[in-house]
Amino acid sequence: MTKFAEVLRKVHEMEPRVQCITNFVTVNDCANIILAAGGTPSMADHIDEVAEALSCVQALVCNMGAIALTDSMIVGGKEANRRKIPVVLDPVAVGGTQLRRDAAKRLLEEVHFTAIRGNASEIRYLAGQQTTGAGVDVSDLDAITEENLPEAQEMIKNLAKSLGTVIAVSGVIDLVSDGERTMVLRNGCATMSRITGSGCMLTSMIGAFVGAAAEDPFTATCAAMAAMGIAGEIAEKKRIKNGTGNATFRTDLIDAVFNLTEEELTKGARYEIF
Ligand SMILES: Nc1ncnc2c1ncn2[C@@H]1O[C@H](COP(=O)(O)OP(=O)(O)O)[C@@H](O)[C@H]1O
Ligand SMILES: Cc1ncsc1CCOP(=O)(O)O
Ligand SMILES: [Mg+2]
């Protein structure tokens, strides 16, 4: 069995509780994907309860889609740091508005994140690059391609080093780096970008995986990226077979995570490590 399978087994055995401060667009999907992966979600996000609620969780996920809850994320993130609970950030549309740029600056100054997962526009913005972000989605100009892969690998490696965190970029090609190791993953399918929430769900799953395998957040993040991509491929096969659309795909994606076996994860993961 691979290390990915070991991480999945830990998630199933530990059933980590993952607290999410997240947006109202995809909150239900985030809760269900954590359950599908074997964890337990807690959506406590009020500033007056967020720190106290952390007393019984294994990971905190801060999703900037909930931009009005930035203060809750800072209070919760600091308390999680104090308790040595991993914190994962999803920098939704981070370069898009001044409010989000300021929020990201505050979050990165005040909270140490174990992992940050975004699309290429979001991660390139955090790396200080000029971006052409299209709201919550990646812009074509920022996307990671076979042509710009060496540059993108260098970019996330440097960002991971400078922030002391695991950086994960999702898209057609996924990349993960902790500043030393960098993994390129090639799972998933285009329909994943035709539902809202695949990114938020992935970040929530990283929360569950990092919560269960806190000793190796790089491998835990890679395992979550591979698991989500393979689940997307399983859901896509069903969609093509049954002629269904994006609404059923969303349900099938969650089902595929629920039913994902260690063997499927081991055999299905397409990755290279650098
Ligand atoms: N065209 C694609 N081909 C393969 N996988 C994709 C594609 N678009 C998105 N994904 C997958 O969908 C998930 C969400 O990624 P992404 O769409 O980049 O996030 P976001 O919704 O935050 O922009 C990831 O698992 C990613 O690998
Ligand atoms: C549409 C939208 N608007 C604010 S948050 C959000 C959800 C973004 O979800 P994802 O990045 O997972 O598609
Ligand atoms: Mg997103």
Image (cartoon, rainbow, N blue to C red):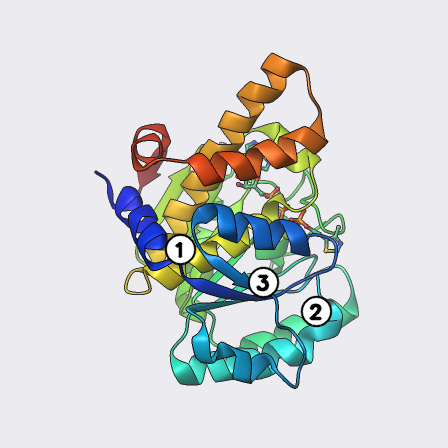
Looking at the image, tell me whether mark 3 or mark 2 is earlier in sequence order. 2
Cβ at disc 2 under 8 Å from ligand 2 = no
Read off the residue under disc 3: 126
Give percent across and percent down for residue 120: 59, 48
The amino acid sitting under disc 1 is: Phe
Comes first in the chain, label 3 or label 1:
3
Amino acid under label 3? Leu
Q: In this view, does 201 lie to the left or right of 98?
A: left
The Cα–Cα distance between marks 2 and 1, rounded to whole angstroms, is: 28 Å
- Residue topped by disc 2: 101
Which quarter of the rendering shows the C terminus? top left
Q: How many labels does the image show?
A: 3
Q: Which residue is drawn at 31% across and 28% down?
A: 267
Q: Residue at x 78, y 64 (%)?
A: 97
Vertically, is 153 above or below 261? Answer: below
Query: Could you tell me if residue 47 is visible in this image?
Result: yes
Counting residues from the start of the chain, the first of labels 2 and 1 encountered is 2
Point out residue 66 in the picture as x, y percentages from the top left corner.
71, 65
Q: In terms of depth relative to the viewer, which is nearer, 50 or 108?
A: 50
Where is residue 157? Give x, y as percent: 41, 56
Drawn side of residue 107 relative to residue 208, left or right: right
Check contact, mark 2 vs mark 1: CB within 8 A.
no
Residue at x 70% of width, y 30% of height: 246
Cα separation between marks 3 and 1? 23 Å
Q: Which of marks 2 and 1 is in front?
A: 1
Q: Which of marks 3 and 1 is in front?
A: 1
> Mark 2 Cα within 10 Å, few/some/many (few <14, many 20+)?
some
Q: Residue 264 in the image: x percent, y percent?
A: 35, 30
| Residue 150 in sight here | no
Local secondary structure at mark 2: helix
Q: Nearer the viewer, residue 91 or 257?
A: 257
Residue that mark 1 sits on? 209
